[in-house]
Amino acid sequence: MTPKQRADQLYNRMTIDFLIDKQQTKICSLICVEEILDEISNYCESIEQIEKANDFYSEVITELHKI
């Protein structure tokens, strides 16, 4: 999965109700990614895995800002 695909997936999952506007959905998605970044070190076994996950989710954040 590419960072763009992951960003789209998160954004679409946060679209719970059509009363929530695009900006609110984007904010919810960004909060989700922030939570993932906060927990990465708890689930990765090596520094390389942590860095790779951090890089990936940093790109996801960039893609979410483009939506």
Image (cartoon, rainbow, N blue to C red):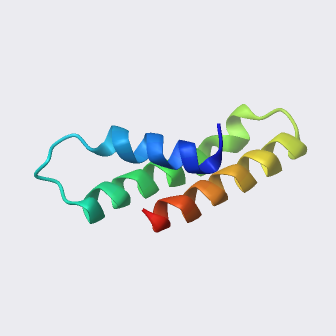
**Position in image of residue 2 (x %, y %):** 65, 44
Between residue 14 and residue 66, name the one nearer to us. Answer: 66
Determine whether, in the image, residue 26 is placed left or right of residue 59: left
Between residue 34 and residue 11, name the one nearer to us. Answer: 11
The quadrant holding residue 15 is: top left
**Position in image of residue 53 (x %, y %):** 73, 45
Residue at (83% x, 40% y) in the render: 49
Quadrant position of the N terminus in the picture = top right
Quadrant position of the C terminus in the picture = bottom left
Residue at (35% x, 38% y) in the render: 13
Determine whether, in the image, residue 47 is placed left or right of residue 41: right
The quadrant holding residue 58 is: bottom right
Between residue 65 and residue 51, name the one nearer to us. Answer: 65
In the rendered image, the vertical position of residue 46 relative to residue 19, given as above or below: above
**Position in image of residue 42 (x %, y %):** 69, 37
Residue at (19% x, 60% y) in the render: 21
